[in-house]
Image (spheres, grey):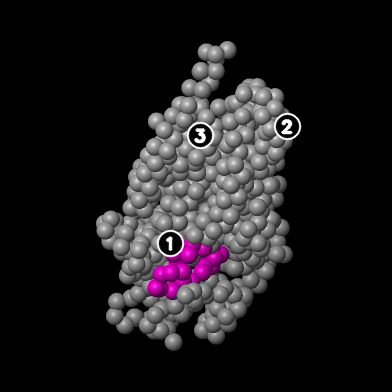
């Protein structure tokens, strides 16, 4: 399959899922009325449901998915390891801790943008810790173990901060920060996350040629004129911005960056530069599909999106481990 | 357009003081007085609602300790009065060390603690949350009987019933619809104290119209589609929680009806102070039947 054809197919898939997400919800509205209300604002509550509830939710699902897919593909390219994924190696958990700290200290109430910014700082610290512990090009085992430790530490700190809150509902928020959810997001969240997501996507997008060269090894890439330090910095900053912004508004949405590149890599002949756009589109599609599924499985209840993604993602993860065992 | 938010505090208090002078007097005069010598003398309460009932009725020196929440103005309507008491955290060991002759507890909270205290031979009386005005009145009388303060309890209960009757006004035509909405999209049931408060204020609870007698979760979309005349956003506490972030959703402010804010302290416990909640909600009636 040519890259152009793949991107087109994925684009059509995302567009279809986006439409389906707009038409999914507890309020029984027929598709024609729903879309008309979306376009014109409609009369009465249907317009509010479409424009203020479903549209931002679908937009954010696509944006979060694209960010996570892109981050997964870029991290895997940089570390040359198919298991590198923001959720699995603890970067999302670190971002979540940053966001929770911003919320509980009141910083996010004073400056709305402090929420994604703090998540970015958390994610940055997470990526930094992982690179320090497991190293670029380090072994898979070191990467996974460092990720487990970072995840456990950040999740525990998040739980501690939320348990210290005087609000009785704060402790229940632990589930949101660990499993993620797009329920009842609004355009406030979209606007809050969009700038950092755009920055992250821009930085990651440009790493394609560098990652391509890196498949031949660091020395070969350097001899081809790739500035490795700059490439590494782009991936680190890009991932921190994209994952931080996504986590700040949707909690920890795991496995997207693992599953999507895993499925799409054979279709792009393992070219990192082609995998990046494909993974962005695929991630958007996967999160849209998962967010439709949570609303169909348990309508009216907030089934966390991370539950479904883990059901899909964990078997892929196990498969990767199985294959690694075979190779060893 | 932002709906009118009803501020907590002084305005409502003034209205209460103007409209219900007897209630405030009853609350404050109940404190002093002679205790029945046979009544328990070392009472410890381990539940926010029994804290406040006991505060209202106990004789001086009769009450030994209350929960920390009773002193928190965000949770308790009697925080100022509670401040002079010792606090406990509802743990069996600290309660035991107070050497109580009566422990007051909620029926559904701290059941392990209650079982352990009873095992240690301490008398524990549990109070179920009041789910109606009738249960609220019964629990005032029961607390009075337990503390040997029957006369005060009867006076407060009678005053409450009179004030409630005074607040209830028939509405012209079909009453407007009010919906409560809390963290995670929880809507209190209509067969509850909340439901009776809403009804007394001259509204029909949305929960009754959709058959949520016992309460349940109401998705944001369903609430918007129901488009009630009043949305009562029920908050626990001003500290931020993601679970309560949904109460700030812009779709709520796009609704045509009004919005009011209630904090848990205003109505989670069955106390005479719930009449303040009735009064404040009634001020939101679109037909202006109150004034």
Q: Residues within 10 Å of mark 1 (few under 14, many from 20)?
A: many
x, y percentage for residue B239?
Answer: 62, 59
| Label 3 chain ID | A
- Residue in the image at 59% along x and 61% along y: B237
Do tags 1 and 3 sit on the same chain?
yes
Query: Which range of residues does the magenta coloring cover?
Result: B244-270
x, y percentage for residue A172?
Answer: 54, 48
The label on residue A52 is 1
Would you name the residue on which mark 2 appears? A132
Do tags 3 and 2 sit on the same chain?
yes
- Residue in the image at 67% along x and 24% along y: A220
x, y percentage for residue A141?
Answer: 63, 22
Q: Is residue B253 magenta?
A: yes
Would you name the residue on which mark 3 appears? A275
Mark 1 → mark 2, Cα distance in angstroms? 43 Å
In the image, which is nearer the foreground, mark 1 or mark 3? Answer: 3
- Residue in the image at 33% along x and 76% along y: B175
């Amino acid at each position: 399959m040519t890259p152009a054809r793949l991107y087109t197919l994925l684009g059509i898939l995302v567009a279809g899922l986006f439409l389906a997400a707009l038409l999914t919800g507890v309020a029984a509205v027929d598709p024609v009325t729903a879309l008309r209300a979306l376009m014109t604002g409609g009369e009465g509550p249907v317009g509010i449901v479409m424009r203020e509830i479903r549209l931002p939710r679908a937009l954010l699902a696509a944006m979060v998915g694209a960010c996570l897919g892109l981050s997964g593909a870029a991290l895997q390219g940089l570390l040359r390891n198919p298991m590198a994924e923001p959720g699995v190696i603890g970067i999302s958990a670190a971002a979540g801790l940053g966001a929770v700290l911003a919320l509980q200290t009141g910083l996010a109430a004073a400056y709305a943008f402090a929420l994604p910014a703090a998540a970015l700082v958390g994610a940055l610290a997470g990526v930094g810790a992982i690179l320090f512990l497991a190293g670029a090009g380090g072994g898979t085992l070191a990467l996974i173990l460092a990720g487990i430790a970072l995840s456990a530490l950040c999740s525990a700190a998040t739980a501690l901060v939320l348990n210290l809150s005087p609000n009785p509902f704060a402790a229940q928020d632990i589930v949101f920060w660990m499993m993620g959810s797009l329920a009842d997001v609004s355009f406030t969240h979209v606007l809050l996350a969009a700038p950092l997501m755009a920055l992250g996507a821009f930085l990651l997008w440009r790493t394609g040629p560098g990652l391509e060269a890196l498949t031949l090894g660091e020395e070969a890439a350097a001899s081809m004129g790739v500035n490795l330090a700059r490439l590494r910095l782009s991936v680190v900053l890009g991932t921190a911005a994209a994952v931080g912004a996504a986590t700040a508004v949707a909690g920890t949405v795991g496995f997207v960056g693992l599953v999507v590149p895993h499925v799409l890599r054979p279709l792009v002949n393992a070219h990192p530069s082609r995998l990046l756009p494909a993974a962005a589109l695929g991630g958007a599609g996967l999160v849209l599909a998962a967010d439709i599924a949570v609303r169909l499985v348990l309508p009216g209840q907030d089934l966390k999106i991370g539950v479904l993604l883990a059901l899909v993602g964990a078997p892929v993860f196990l498969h990767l481990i199985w294959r690694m065992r075979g190779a060893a | 357009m932002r709906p009118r938010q009803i501020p907590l505090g002084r305005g409502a208090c003034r209205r209460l003081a103007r409209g219900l002078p007897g209630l405030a007097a009853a609350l404050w005069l109940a404190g002093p007085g002679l205790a029945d010598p046979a009544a328990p003398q070392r009472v410890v309460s381990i539940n926010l609602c029994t804290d406040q009932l006991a505060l209202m009725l106990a004789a001086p020196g009769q009450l030994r300790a209350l929960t920390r929440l009773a002193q928190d103005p965000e949770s308790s309507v009697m925080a100022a009065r509670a401040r002079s008491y010792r606090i406990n955290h509802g743990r069996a060991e600290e309660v035991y060390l107070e050497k109580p002759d009566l422990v007051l507890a909620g029926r559904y909270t701290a059941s392990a603690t209650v079982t352990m205290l009873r095992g240690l031979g301490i008398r524990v009386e549990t109070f179920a949350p009041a789910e109606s005005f009738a249960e609220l009145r019964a629990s005032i009388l029961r607390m009075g009987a337990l503390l040997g303060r029957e006369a005060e309890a009867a006076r407060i209960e009678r005053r409450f019933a009179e004030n409630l009757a005074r607040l209830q006004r028939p509405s012209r035509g079909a009453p407007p619809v009010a919906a409560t909405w809390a963290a995670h999209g929880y809507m209190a049931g209509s067969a509850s104290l909340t439901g009776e408060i809403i009804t007394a204020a001259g509204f029909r609870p949305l929960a009754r119209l959709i058959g949520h007698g016992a309460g349940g979760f109401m998705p944001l979309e369903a609430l918007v589609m129901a488009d009630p005349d009043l949305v009562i956003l029920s908050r626990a506490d001003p500290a931020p929680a993601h679970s309560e972030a949904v109460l700030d959703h812009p779709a709520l402010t796009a609704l045509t009806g009004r919005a009011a804010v209630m904090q848990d302290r205003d109505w989670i416990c069955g106390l005479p102070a719930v009449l303040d909640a009735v009064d404040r909600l009634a001020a939101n009636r679109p037909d202006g039947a109150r004034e």
